[in-house]
Amino acid sequence: MTGQAAPLTAGRTIVVISDRIDHAGAGEAAAWADLPPGEAPWQDPRGQDVEVTGGYLERLPLACVAAGIVDAAEVWHHQTGGGRAPFRAAGPRLGYRAFRLDDAHAPLDNRDMVDFVHAFGAPHVLVVYGLGVSTALLDACANSVIVYNSIDAPTLRVPAQVSARFDLVLTGAPWQSAEVEARHPGMATAVLPVGPEFAAIDLFRPLRGPRDYDVIYVAAAQGYKRHDILLDAFARLPRDVRGLCVFGYGEDGDAIRAQIAERGLSIDCIGPPGVPFDEVNRLMNRARIGVVCGRDDGAPAILTEYMLAGLPVLANADLACGTQYILPETGMLAAADGFADAILTLRERAAGLDPRKEVLARWTWPHTIERLRPLLVAARENKSRTY
């Protein structure tokens, strides 16, 4: 049994499935469980305005709504333990659902999602991130336009039998597109990493106030974010250079703090847990430059988020995806062993740069959605010929 996706007309929906797994306690029964079979649970938001905001999970689907490609959007997560969490509306156009997951091995085989699609139909566009979903769900959504983004540096984080069902793969760099082509000749790809490309115009913005930090690094407290590069750089910098690390999540926060204390580095840390977007923006505005230290990383959203807040960016020259956002007008690249000197150089240049202007001209969501629109139309037309 496959779900039925509508053509590019009224009643269009987009679903984004993240690879996040929530570990819940006791919860409520599913909001959709009591709906009569065949009665789609989507809201009817026509005529309601939408703001493109939030994180990388929300901005792509909201941009599709704002551009009129679809009418409503949902973000789906996986959940272990407890009862199924109820539907949560985040406004007239966006909602969240969590579905019970019995086996947390990737690709995630969530039969609860499959049952939902069988009961209510498939979305018009299905976007799958990261560790991916099982072929059972993709078969249930066979008539949907299926889009994949790995988010991190590995191009395809799913087995070939899963990726073969994708209609479009969004990549972070040309080398990733080449890897997709090598596995699946003829598959459509586009270098449109969802984090930096679908930038929200005013979510991050310049503020007035003192800049009492020279450097800020907003990144998960996890090894692949390579905080060690920043710490080694600070060990070589003058002690009056001050840094701030903001951790949204991750298991290495205590270890990083301990290293900073042992080495006597001028770096403060906040989190985990993370802080709201407004607070992240305020913290960015206390610094002069933002850094991205990772190498084996996807194109992180923070690249353009720093820039929208007015900060030029120093990025690791070996960053696997995302160096295309580092222009002379937006920052600079440096090897790990040259980070200390690069911090001093970019700090001196920062006042003369306007990275927000460059992002507004190139990478905010209104630009990117017009690149995505014809790709979705082409995928729909190709699928119509196939089915």
Image (spheres, rainbow, N blue to C red):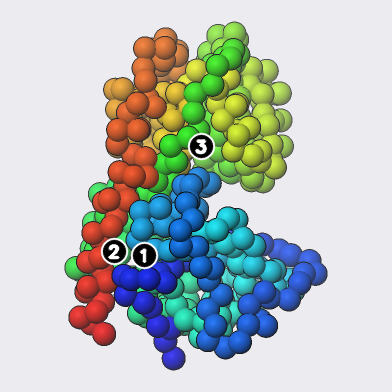
Disc 2 and disc 3 in contact, CB within 8 angstroms: no
Q: CA distance from mark 2 to mark 3?
A: 26 Å
Disc 2 and disc 1 in contact, CB within 8 angstroms: yes
Mark 1: give few (<14), some (14-19) or many (20+) Cα within 10 Å.
Answer: many
Hey, which residue is sitting farthest bottom in the picture?
Answer: 1
Query: What amino acid type should be assigned to the residue bearing mark 2?
Result: Leu
Q: Earlier in the sequence, mark 2 or mark 1?
A: 1
219 vs 312, left or right, is right
Query: What amino acid type should be assigned to the residue bearing mark 1?
Result: Val
Q: Nearer the viewer, residue 286 or 343?
A: 286
Q: Secondary structure at mark 3?
A: loop
Q: CA distance from mark 1 to mark 3?
A: 25 Å
Mark 3: give few (<14), some (14-19) or many (20+) Cα within 10 Å.
Answer: some
From the viewer's perspective, is residue 368 above or below residue 133? above
Q: Nearer the viewer, residue 81 or 89?
A: 89
Instruction: Look at mark 3 in the image and give the residue it sits on.
Output: 203
Q: CA distance from mark 2 to mark 1?
A: 9 Å
Q: Nearer the viewer, mark 1 or mark 3?
A: 3
The location of residue 187, given as percent across then percent down, is 24, 67
Q: Which mark is residue 376?
A: 2
Q: Earlier in the sequence, mark 2 or mark 3?
A: 3
Mark 2: give few (<14), some (14-19) or many (20+) Cα within 10 Å.
Answer: some
Q: Which mark is residue 147?
A: 1
From the viewer's perspective, is residue 384 above or below residue 17? below
349 vs 102, left or right, is left
Q: Nearer the viewer, mark 2 or mark 1?
A: 2
Q: Earlier in the sequence, mark 1 or mark 3?
A: 1
